[in-house]
Image (tube, rainbow, N blue to C red):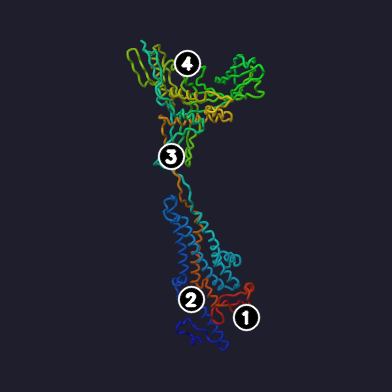
């Protein structure tokens, strides 16, 4: 009876199982008492607090705390490393490695907690109403990994809402590590260094200091009769060498200072040389003179000396032999001519033309001396030129800018060019043609009636739209005053805004160098030790690369001019390239959400277990061993094969409640 079966050690609420009475009334009464007593065994005492209930979940609380702590550690590392150079990281392991380890710790701890929650919700699920025994295995599989979680979502659906949420969290955890791996990247970042500047040389003046010395006798009116004239100073060998380099393909390079290997300049302009080539074969003119002479006993030959002229006036001389036998021969193969002044201008200062032409190089290829073409050579109308090119070298303005050095590669080729117009000598009715208005006296000596003057002749040039307009001085018959007026006006042009200056003597040196290098020719009889310079020029013409060669020469000359003593170092922005740690925060949304909802699932599971004072079994297999099945015959449970057990479990329904012996059982639902 109830009073006799009360245990002294367990207190009044912990009753032993009563003996089965003989009368029906006592049986019903005691069965009711038994069920209440067992319920008290399933449900914890009412006096149990939430704090004491949470002690049953201490391992899961520790697990979720570990997961959250690892996630917070990841955030700490990300905040510390974001937008910082990788070189500042001194640890042996790189930050992405540490983040990956912490991500694995957070995920593993979180999955353990979710698995235990699903296991506890399994018992709640069966306590609420009868379900198939097969569902127990589905819950157990769901607590172990993603595949089981998928099966739970498929078979259980939303009849177990919290457990389905845990299954979804298990599946989402698969993406945690890939997402965390995307959070951090090592990007190559370029930043400007304001403490150090790059330098790039430009020039608005080409003047190496060469001057001309004029000596003579001073006339009564102050003018001087020139008796002697010579130049002072050595020629600019740098520009001459730059021409050689351009011909042979190894262009002169002005030094550029850029320690980082990445430098950018705002648009810059510099005095330079531009090249342009035109095919003038169809416009060639030819003038010949003839001379008969004896050759090999009775055979007489007619020699013809011809001048082949380009449209601009370059003349190339060839000698052709025309025997009586009807065949002809010439050994000329390639020839070139350099013209440095316009023959149509007669004034004495025609070294620099208005458009800044330095030289016109005409290069001609002749037809071969064999075959049927020989017979046409001596015909008066025949021009024995296969191809003639006319290349012009001019002073110009070249524009540079942008990233001239990238990743250590120098790209100092100009981005554009504009022509220059030199102040005409005919300006103000020939004022500069009659006087040395652009000459700057650097030294003079007067001794009695004799005078020696040393001066530099700097010619000003401007872009077409930037030529200043100055008023011409009034005409004066006094030659001395006109000379002073010319110098005054010339100084105004030289000092004018946007002016470019070229030393006339330096210009003559360039012209002399071009004549020396380009003037000449080659015949078909190659000789060992032949001028390699002429061979290179001929090869460029025959291979169609003459225009390219002249462009190289012009650019090489420009680089050397930029590097003259008149060059100005222009500061550029220096960029350093470094590897920086960049954090992509959106990728942390999923890991944070998974850990957050896992924490919520644990909290709800604790509350659900505490709310009805349920015993906490979680995923323990021992609970199934201690509390077995009840209500089925032995033959119904007699299944040896796994597939047989699974098939029968799908049909067997049970709920978790007190059995006939008073202990909690999975009782068959009738």
**Which dot, 1 or 2, sits closer to the camera?**
1
Viewer-proximal residue among 73 and 575 = 575
C-alpha distance separating marks 4 and 1: 133 Å
Task: Please tell me whether mark 3 sits on a helix, a strand or a loop.
Answer: loop
Disc 1 and disc 2: Cα gap in Å? 33 Å
The mark that comes first in sequence, 2 or 4, is 2
Q: Is residue 393 above or below residue 10?
A: above
Residue that label 1 marks: 634
Q: Which mark is residue 258?
A: 3
Question: Which residue is most to the bottom?
Answer: 22
Q: Residue at label 2?
A: 44
- Does any portion of residue 503 appear in the rendered image? yes
3D distance between C-alphas at marks 2 and 3? 79 Å
Q: Give the residue furthest to the top.
A: 220
Marks 2 & 4, CB-CB < 8 Å contact: no
Look at the image and tell me whether residue 357 can be seen: no
For residue 661, which numbered disc appears in the image? none
Check the image and report above or below for 60 versus 469.
Answer: below
- In the structure shown, which secondary structural element does the residue marked by tag 4 occupy? loop
**Residue 477 or residue 96, whichever sits in front:** 96
| Mark in the foreground, 3 or 1 | 3
Q: Residue at x 59, y 19 (%)?
A: 319
Q: Are marks 2 and 3 in contact (CB under 8 Å)?
A: no
Q: Quadrant of the C terminus?
A: bottom right
Callout 2 crowding tier (Cα within 10 Å): few <14, some 14–19, many ≥20: some
Which residue is denoted by mark 4 in the rendering? 347
Left or right, 520 with respect to 219, comes to right
């Amino acid at each position: 009876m109830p009073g006799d079966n009360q245990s002294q050690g367990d207190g009044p609420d912990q009753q032993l199982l009563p003996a089965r009475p003989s009368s029906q009334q006592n049986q019903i009464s005691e069965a009711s008492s038994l069920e209440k007593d067992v319920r008290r065994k399933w449900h914890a005492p009412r006096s149990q607090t939430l704090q004491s209930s949470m002690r049953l979940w201490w391992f899961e609380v520790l697990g979720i705390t570990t997961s959250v702590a690892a996630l917070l550690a990841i955030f700490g590392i990300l905040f510390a490393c974001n937008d910082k150079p990788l070189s500042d990281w001194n640890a042996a392991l790189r930050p992405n490695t540490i983040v990956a380890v912490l991500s694995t710790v957070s995920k593993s701890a979180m999955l353990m907690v979710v698995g235990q929650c699903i296991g506890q919700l399994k018992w709640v699920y069966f306590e609420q109403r009868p379900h198939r025994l097969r569902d127990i295995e589905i819950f157990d599989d769901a607590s172990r990994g993603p595949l089981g979680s998928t099966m739970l979502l498929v078979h259980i659906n939303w009849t177990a809402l919290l457990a389905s949420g845990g299954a979804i969290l298990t599946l989402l955890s698969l993406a945690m590590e890939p997402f965390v791996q995307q959070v951090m990247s090592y990007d190559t970042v370029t930043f400007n260094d304001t403490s150090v500047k790059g330098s790039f040389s430009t020039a608005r003046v080409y003047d190496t200091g060469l001057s001309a010395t004029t000596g003579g006798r001073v006339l009564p009116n102050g003018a001087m009769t020139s008796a002697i004239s010579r130049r002072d100073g050595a020629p600019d060998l740098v520009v001459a060498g730059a021409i050689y380099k351009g011909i042979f393909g190894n262009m002169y390079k002005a030094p550029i200072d850029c320690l980082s290997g990445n430098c950018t300049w705002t648009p810059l302009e510099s005095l330079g040389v531009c090249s342009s080539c035109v095919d003038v074969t169809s416009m060639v003119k030819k003038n010949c003179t003839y001379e008969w002479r004896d050759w090999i006993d009775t055979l007489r030959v007619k020699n013809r000396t011809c001048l082949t002229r380009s449209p601009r006036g370059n003349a190339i001389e060839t000698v052709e032999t025309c025997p009586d036998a009807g065949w002809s021969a010439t050994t000329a193969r390639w020839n070139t001519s350099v013209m440095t002044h316009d023959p149509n201008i007669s004034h004495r200062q025609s070294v620099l033309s208005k458009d800044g032409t330095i030289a016109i190089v005409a290069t001609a290829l002749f037809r071969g001396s064999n075959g049927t073409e020989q017979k046409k050579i001596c015909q008066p109308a025949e021009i024995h030129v296969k191809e003639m090119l006319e290349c012009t070298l001019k002073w110009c303005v070249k524009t540079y800018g942008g990233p001239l050095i990238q990743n250590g590669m120098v790209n100092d080729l100009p981005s554009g060019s504009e022509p220059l117009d030199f102040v005409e000598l005919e300006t103000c009715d020939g004022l500069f043609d009659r006087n040395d208005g652009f000459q700057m006296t650097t030294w003079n000596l007067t001794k009695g009636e004799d005078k020696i003057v040393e001066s530099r002749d700097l010619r000003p040039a401007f872009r077409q739209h930037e030529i200043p307009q100055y008023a011409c001085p009034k005409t004066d018959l006094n030659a001395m005053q006109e000379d002073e007026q010319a110098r005054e006006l010339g100084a105004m042009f030289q000092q004018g805004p946007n002016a470019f200056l070229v030393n006339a003597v330096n210009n003559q040196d360039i012209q002399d160098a071009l004549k020396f290098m380009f003037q000449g020719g080659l015949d078909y009889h190659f000789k060992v030790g032949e001028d390699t310079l002429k061979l290179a020029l001929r090869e460029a013409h025959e291979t169609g690369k003459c225009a390219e060669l002249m462009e190289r020469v012009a650019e090489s000359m420009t680089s050397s001019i930029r590097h003259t003593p008149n060059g100005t170092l222009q500061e550029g922005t220096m960029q350093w390239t470094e590897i920086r740690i960049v954090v992509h925060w959106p990728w942390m949304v999923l890991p944070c959400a998974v850990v957050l909802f896992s924490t919520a699932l644990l909290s709800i599971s604790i509350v659900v277990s505490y709310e009805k004072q349920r015993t906490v079994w979680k995923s323990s297999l021992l609970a199934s061993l201690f509390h077995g099945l009840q209500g089925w015959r032995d033959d119904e449970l007699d299944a040896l094969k796994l597939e047989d057990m699974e098939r029968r479990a799908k049909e067997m329904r049970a709920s978790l409640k007190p059995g006939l012996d008073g202990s909690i059982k999975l009782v068959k639902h009738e």
